[in-house]
Amino acid sequence: MQNSGEVVNAVATTGRGARGGGARIWDALLWQDIFLTLLLSTFILSCAAPKEVVKEEEEVEDFWSMIPLIELSDDVVYSPAGDMRAHLPQGWIAMDANQFGNPDIFAVACDPDYRMAVIFSNIPLDTEIGDVFRGGGMMGLLKKNYQDRIERISDWFQPQLIDAEEFALGRQRFGAYTFTTDSNLTVTRVGLFYTRKNLYECTMTHLPYSESELPTTEEIKEIHQIVLGGIEW
């Protein structure tokens, strides 16, 4: 999870007016300057402490924001074709992909609290997908993938698309879209990428049956980005 801050420094300058001709006027101005200096010094000292506290709090927040939500482990999963591999998050539990009854799914893992899962699957290629890619590129593939998913689940749920984007992580290009079926109580983010021979899907989704607090939509996206960044082909 790439933060930046902007510090704006305001500098004020003040000056004293010209001195009068008489000694009394000079004494009055002198005491006035001393009084204003003391008053200004007191004001600056009274404001200095809270500003420093705010700065320290901001520095602590910036420090924690730089720590990623997960780290990738040395545990690696491979596609059946052997043309891509992905690192699983540290401490996540790998599951038997065969138990899901979908031959296209080849790897599944969930976090220790069973709040979310990552699913890797192969997307069978056909002439329709080829036509979609030639006509609309990655965004066309995302649209078709989402439409196919709606057809599979619309009898039970009412999916709502949250966002869709195309991006690069290093030299690898990806597309991803996020959707919900329960008004953002749970979300799923689907990432697509292709090697020279195959099209793959990497999905990060909430597990709604966990008793622990679920990650936010932004946290799901950040974790998904880290996992996508660990995919190699």
Image: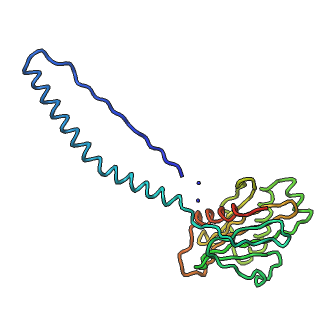
**Relative to the observer, which residue lies in front, 86 or 36?**
86
| Residue at far top of view | 21
**Relative to the observer, which residue lies in front, 152 or 167?**
167
Quadrant containing the C terminus is bottom right
| Residue at far bottom of view | 99
Depicted 156 relative to depicted 10: above or below: below
Answer left or right for 225 relative to 11: right
Depicted 125 relative to depicted 117: above or below: above
Depicted 233 relative to depicted 4: above or below: below
Residue at the spot 74% in from the left edge and 77% down from the top edge: 155
Depicted 3 relative to depicted 115: above or below: above
Residue at the spot 42% in from the left edge and 54% down from the top edge: 58
| Residue at far front of view | 74
Disc count in the image?
Answer: 0
Answer left or right for 173 relative to 30: right
Answer left or right for 169 relative to 82: left
Residue at the spot 90% in from the left edge and 62% down from the top edge: 128
Residue 28 picture location, percent across and down: 10, 26
The image quarter in which residue 35 lies = top left
Residue 24 picture location, percent across and down: 7, 21
Quadrant containing the N terminus is bottom right
| Residue at far right of view | 127
The image quarter in which residue 151 lies = bottom right
Residue 48 picture location, percent across and down: 29, 47
The image quarter in which residue 13 lies = top left
Query: What is the image's colouring?
Result: rainbow
Residue 168 picture location, percent across and down: 72, 53
